[in-house]
Image (spheres, helix red, strand yellow):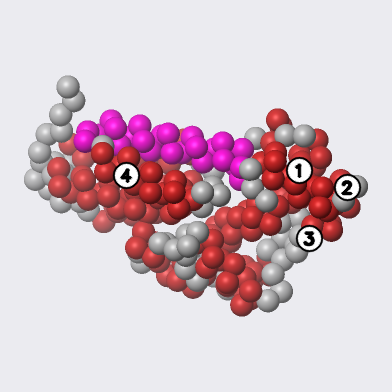
Amino acid sequence: QEKDLEYQQPLNKNDFSSIEMILTCILASEYEKAERILHEILSAFPQNHVSISSSRKYLDMLFEAFSPLYCFYFDNGTERQKTLLHSFGRCLILKEFVDLFHLSLHEIRVSPLKADSTHYRREVRDMIGYIHRNIDTKITLTQLSLSVNMAGSYISRLFKSETGVNVTTYVNRLKMERAMVLLREPDTFIKQTAAALGYEDQSYFNRIFNKYTGMSPAEFRHSYQYGTYSHRASKLYS
């Protein structure tokens, strides 16, 4: 049976900054890199004589930061977040933590926002392609219906039945995911980020961002700069 050995040293600043690196990789769909960073950090703990309590603190912070990002990709995000944190609380050995993280990343890969759309009907694939090509503009149901030459009411039902999410939710999540990447650039103004995603009204962009991430764009940027993201993103799907 696998057992953790007790070490004496606390975590250092690089260990905690790796959490931000892991989240950034997930946002950029670089899942293998995220897992590699986690593996390198955890493998270094014994060599650096990191204590069991410090190791657990690192994993606590990682999953606290990861869980709101994880549930961002699903309609039933709140319930998924509760399930994830419950599963995390039951983990006792390192392998269980790593396996749970790997499983969670796999679920993100196959979520409606990230899933390979090749198995969807052609009309839905065409709509998804249109959304991705025009993510920097205001996307309306009328535009989507014209892109596939179908009635708006019909494509709404079709999109939901194929992907599991409605069109508006899909578009907003995709835009907010892109916004989280853009906002990490310190020289980019929030107004520029909003405009880059087709929002003419910054206050409306702020409301949408808050709805899907649990914080304002300014709070999100500040939290990443000062390493407090895990304590701020707590309002998802509320």
Percent across and percent down for residue 204 are: 63, 74
Q: How many labels does the image show?
A: 4
Report if the CB atoms under discs 4 and 1 are less than 8 Å apart.
no
The residue that disc 1 covers is 158
The residue that disc 2 covers is 150
First-in-chain label (2 vs 4): 4
The residue that disc 4 covers is 86
Percent across and percent down for residue 141 are: 79, 57
What amino acid type is highlighted by mark number 3? Thr
Relative side of 95 to 225, left or right:
left
The residue that disc 3 covers is 140
Q: Is mark 2 on a helix, strand or loop?
A: loop
What amino acid type is highlighted by mark number 2? Met
- Residue at point 38%, 49% (across, down): 82
Asked if the stretch drawn in magenta spans residue 97, the answer is yes
- Residue at point 48%, 62% (across, down): 238
Image vertical order of residue 217 relative to residue 213, above or below: below
Q: Is mark 3 on a helix, strand or loop?
A: loop
Residue segment shown in magenta: 92-115
Q: How far apart are marks 1 and 2 (CA)?
A: 10 Å
User: Residue pushed farthest top?
Assistant: 1
Report if the CB atoms under discs 1 and 2 are less than 8 Å apart.
yes
First-in-chain label (4 vs 1): 4
Percent across and percent down for residue 193 are: 62, 68
Which dot marks residue 121?
A: none
The answer to whether residue 170 shows anywhere in this view is yes
First-in-chain label (3 vs 2): 3
What amino acid type is highlighted by mark number 1? Leu
Q: How far apart are marks 3 and 4 (CA)?
A: 39 Å
Label 1: how many Cα within 10 Å (few below 14, some 14–19, many 20+): some
Q: Distance between the residues labelled 3 and 2?
A: 14 Å
Nearest the viewer among 233 and 83 is 83
